[in-house]
Image (cartoon, rainbow, N blue to C red):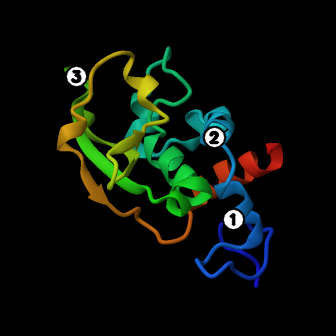
Amino acid sequence: MVCPTCRRGNGTDGDGNCPVCAKYARLKPSKIITAIRAELGPHLLKGKYKKLRPADATPSWGCCYVASEALYHLWGKANGYTAMRLRYGLGPGNGELSGGMHWFLEQRASGLQVDITADQFRGAPLDYENAIPTGFLTKKPSKRAMLVIQGVLSKI
């Protein structure tokens, strides 16, 4: 059976990872993060976020969920990270999205956090203390996360 995460490997290593995914889990996270960030942009946005994206937005703007999900499946899960989310405000004048959810990963035992789309806030501090552990909406990578994962795998 082909691996549902990378769609390249077969079998598992006992933890549910195929040999290809197990290889990526051992890579330096900075290499994977750089590759994920290169895949981000407005083509990944849905619904209200697509409409509200500022013209001068960073490529990571609105991509926290999909970026965190891709990082989780490529590296985070195998290294003990959990999906986290927190409420934030987009500020006045943003109508329906005056409040949104921001997603990132955290290693609960150590408290280490990996927020690969924090630059979208341009220095505005987020209240990470109020983040809650959560799961992603799907057990396997979503369609948007698969786009990012396939882009990353083709470059690493």
Residue 101 shown left or right of residue 63 in the figure: left
Alpha carbon distance from label 3 to label 1? 41 Å
Which residue is under mark 2?
A: 36
Question: Where residue 35 sits: x, y (%)?
Answer: 69, 38
Kind of residue indicated by mark 2: Ile
Residue 7's place in the image compared with 121, above or below, is below
Q: What element carries label 3?
A: loop
Question: Where residue 95 sits: x, y (%)?
Answer: 23, 30
| First along the sequence among labels 2 and 3 | 2
Q: How crowded is mark 2: few (under 14 residues within 10 Å), some or many (20 or more)?
A: many
**What residue is shown at x 74% (from left), y 82% (from top)?**
11
Circles 2 and 3, Cβ within 8 Å, touching? The answer is: no
Q: What element carries label 1?
A: helix
* Comparing labels 2 and 3, the label whose residue is closer to the camera: 2
| First along the sequence among labels 1 and 2 | 1
Image disc number at residue 110: none
Q: What element carries label 2?
A: helix
Which residue is under mark 1?
A: 22
Circles 1 and 2, Cβ within 8 Å, touching? The answer is: no
Which residue is under mark 3?
A: 91
